[in-house]
Amino acid sequence: MKKYFVHRTAEVSKLASIGKGSKIWHLAQIRENAAIGENCIIGKNVYIDHDVRIGSNVKIQNNASMYFGASIEDGVFIGPHVILTNDKLPRAVKTDGSLKNDADWKMSKTVLKKGCSIGAGSVILPGITIGEYVMIGAGSVVTKNIPPFSIAYGNPASVRGKINKSGNKLK
């Protein structure tokens, strides 16, 4: 008997690991060797690429995309339509015009630390670390690391203050 729930329309690789109490909803795709911790909620149409690591008690809302190289720690909130990217120099073709393959690009790791929140529609560029309990405002484009207990927003996102674990802004 399964100790997690997968909606009948979701695609979950047999090589993925899903923790107890997690729920994977409509049309989500979980690729091979992805690891999802306990008590997570993976919303409708979420894409989790191969080898992505997700801790426990994580909520990923509808239409978010987590690409190869993403590492998401415990208690993270990811709003709808968030994208965690992994390629600093994206190109479809090589200089000779031939189609690139997996061996032709370098993945950059993206890390979301414990308890952080990423607002709806945000894009996190490759090679970025978002610190513990950070709050990223909706629609932000994060181009540099954000230190723990910060609130950051904008395009490009910049730190606008400090917050506590609850997300309340400190004076």
Image (cartoon, helix red, strand yellow):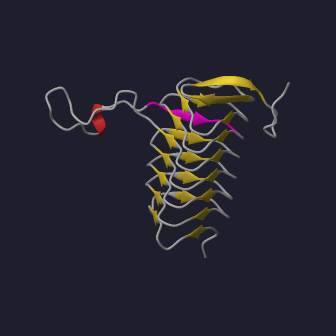
Where residue 12 appears, x then y in whole percent? 47, 63
**Position of 124 relative to 57 (above/below):** above
Tell me the quarter of the picture where residue 108 sits.
top left
Where residue 38 appears, x then y in whole percent? 67, 57
104 sits left or right of 126 in the view:
left
Q: Residue at x 52, y 50 (%)?
A: 64
Where residue 114 appears, x then y in whole percent? 70, 39
155 sits left or right of 19 in the view:
left
Magenta stretch containing residue 68, yes or no?
no
Frontmost residue, 102 versus 14: 102
Residue found farthest to the bottom: 1
Residue found farthest to the right: 171
**Position of 25 relative to 137 (above/below):** below
Q: Residue at x 53, y 61 (%)?
A: 44
Give the magenta part as a residue range.
108-114
Where residue 106 appears, x then y in whole percent? 37, 30
9 sits left or right of 55 in the view:
left
**Position of 31 relative to 122 (above/below):** below
